[in-house]
Image: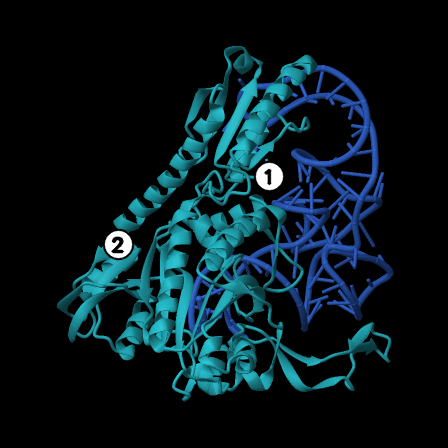
Chain colours: A cyan, B blue
RNA sequence: CGGGAUGUAGCGUAGCCCGGUUAUCGCGCCUGGUUUGGGACCAGGAGGUCGCAAGUUCGAAUCUUGCCAUCCCGACCA
């Protein structure tokens, strides 16, 4: 068959690509660096998006939409921000095409040059803060808690499906607060929301932490992050939440009147997660047979495959299947009934394993006679006969068990792949032979961080939240250090 | 942007060195039939600017040059 997958051991990158393409999540497109998200992949994103959206609203946020285009001058108003993004911006310079006078199709009309170029947003802080300036006058206008679901463009040199594409989908929250404390609280709250989502819905354990200065978002005072561990031992930043201080308020002159009738700059946050999460999901859980999707966000939680034996068996099997489907749907489950007669059961089994459907129910005449169905779970590949009586409730329990099992398995893996290193030799050895997170002392300087990166390709993923304080010596310089930080090679 | 690899039907490929009828094979696809408990079988059929453009030649998938795209590895980044 053409759906042979590359194994993880043979070529991890190729395995990942195979899963994305053959699992039907996405395709390469005709546009360099851009992908097409296919219906199955988009259904997955929709489930993630819907849950996150719910969580944002529960924490008091509302959705809005800001323009795709940002006037060039806006971007340069915050110095660190423009510095960070300038190298990867798509720029609109003209607004009209014309027929080529030389007859070579269509060309840009040189007379249609824009007065001011427009940047295709790499992120929306600038256009949003330019707008907030008009929306905020008084402390009564605060806090302003807005999120937007959007696409952004970052002109990456090297792209990978879901992990890094020139255009990607994400959400970006942008909030404005009267006090520093409140803004920091918001930053931490949203980090918690992300961590909860990724752990409870995606079944991927994360480390919450703070980025070092060099890994910080361009324009932020502090960047908080959640870091996940992939099966190849590399780390992946799964979400970020930024405390922006008054940087953008000052850049865009956003002031408000306090109760005491004083003008003050507002305090800001921004936070985002993207379709990159899908990459994290794939690499955290899947195996050499295909995707393994967590029940809470899988497009289909259950697939039912009928096993016909002669034309006359179709009626009773379909009837029983429909009964089961109704009972599953009544409990809110997402179910697919694949009674497509063009492919046989064996093909379907392999196909839904590839697509990572958490639970498969197979049912034929033999099962009907015994009032049972065959239930197979994707995560462990176990197959069991289960009675039709009370099936739906048992499937719900099974899905919960799969969800928990996937999380525990990923957590056990991460725990196993997290090691302390106490000197340089240990550090190097761990990086090359074991991978994963390496907890080690660092003297706190950007120079040392940079040097370690140059020497090993490992970066400081984060300083974990509520990190244990302990005296030690920096693994590179031997200088005094008050705490360990997490190093890893990363995506 | 540097290094490497690849580009022939939807996918995977043979042919290319050594130019010569109608471009090979498998999967998939369409029609009909038989089937269905781990990637079914039979019969018939459709599908191609050989990545693009120049050049060499009587003749180019094949040789030359340029370009484009994709993947992998690096530098950069979510």
Residue at (55% x, 39% y) in the render: A300
Indicate the quadrant where residue B24 lies.
top right
- Circle 1 chain: A
Q: Position of residue A473 (x, y in %)?
A: 14, 70
Q: In the image shown, does A119 or A68 lie closer to the viewer?
A: A68
Tag shown at residue A406: none
Residue at (13% x, 68% y) in the render: A472
Residue at (28% x, 71% y) in the render: A452
Q: Position of residue A302 (x, y in %)?
A: 52, 33
- The residue labelled by disc 1 is A2
Q: In the image shown, does A240 or A389 lie closer to the viewer?
A: A389
Q: In the image shown, does B13 or A178 lie closer to the viewer?
A: A178
Q: Is residue B57 above or below residue A370?
A: below
Counting other residues with Cα less than 10 Å from the Cα at mark 2, is it few (<14), some (14-19), or many (20 or more)?
Answer: many
Q: Which image quadrant: the N terminus of chain A?
A: top right
- The residue labelled by disc 2 is A418
State the SS at label 1: loop
């Amino acid at each position: 068959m053409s759906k042979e997958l590359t194994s993880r051991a043979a070529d991890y990158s190729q395995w990942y690509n195979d899963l994305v393409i053959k699992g039907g999540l996405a395709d390469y497109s005709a546009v360099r660096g851009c992908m097409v998200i296919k219906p199955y992949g988009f259904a997955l994103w929709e489930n993630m998006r819907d849950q996150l959206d719910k969580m944002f609203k529960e924490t008091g946020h509302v959705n809005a939409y800001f323009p795709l285009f940002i006037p060039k001058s806006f971007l340069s108003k915050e110095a660190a921000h423009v510095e960070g993004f300038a190298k990867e911006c798509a720029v609109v310079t003209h607004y009209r095409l014309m027929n080529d006078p030389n007859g070579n199709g269509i060309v840009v009309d040189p007379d249609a040059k824009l007065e001011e170029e427009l940047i295709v947003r790499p992120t929306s802080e600038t256009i949003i803060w330019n707008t907030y300036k008009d929306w905020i006058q008084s402390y009564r206008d605060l806090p302003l808690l807005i999120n937007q679901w959007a696409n952004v463009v970052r002109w990456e040199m090297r792209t990978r499906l879901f992990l890094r594409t020139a255009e990607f989908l994400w959400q970006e929250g942008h909030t404005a607060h009267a006090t520093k404390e409140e803004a920091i609280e918001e930053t931490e709250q949203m980090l918690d929301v992300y961590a909860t989502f990724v752990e409870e819905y995606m079944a991927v354990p994360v480390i919450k932490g703070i980025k070092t200065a060099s890994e910080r978002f361009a324009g932020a005072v502090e960047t908080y992050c959640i870091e996940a561990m992939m099966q190849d031992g590399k780390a992946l930043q799964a979400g970020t939440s930024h405390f922006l201080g008054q940087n953008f308020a000052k850049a865009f002159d956003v002031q408000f009147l306090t109760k005491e009738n004083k003008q003050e700059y507002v305090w800001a946050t921004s936070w985002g997660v993207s379709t990159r999460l899908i990459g994290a999901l794939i690499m955290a859980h899947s195996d050499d047979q295909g995707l393994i999707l967590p029940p809470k966000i899988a497009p289909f939680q259950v697939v039912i495959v009928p096993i016909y034996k002669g034309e006359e068996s179709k009626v009773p099997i379909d009837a029983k299947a429909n009964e089961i489907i109704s009972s599953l749907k009544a409990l809110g489950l997402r179910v697919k009934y694949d009674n497509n007669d063009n492919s046989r059961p064996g093909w379907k089994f392999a196909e839904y394993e590839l697509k990572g459907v958490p639970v498969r129910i197979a049912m034929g005449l033999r099962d009907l006679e015994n009032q049972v169905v065959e239930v197979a779970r994707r995560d462990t590949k176990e197959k069991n006969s289960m009675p039709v009586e009370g099936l739906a409730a048992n499937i719900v329990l099974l899905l919960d068990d799969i969800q928990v099992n996937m999380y525990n398995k990923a957590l056990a893996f991460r725990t196993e792949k997290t090691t302390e290193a106490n000197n340089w030799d240990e550090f190097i050895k761990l990086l090359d032979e074991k991978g994963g997170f390496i907890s080690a002392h660092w003297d706190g300087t950007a120079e040392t961080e940079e040097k370690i990166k140059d020497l090993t390709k490992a970066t400081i993923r984060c300083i974990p939240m509520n990190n244990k304080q302990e005296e030690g010596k920096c693994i590179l310089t031997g200088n005094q250090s008050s705490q360990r930080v997490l190093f890893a090679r990363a995506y």
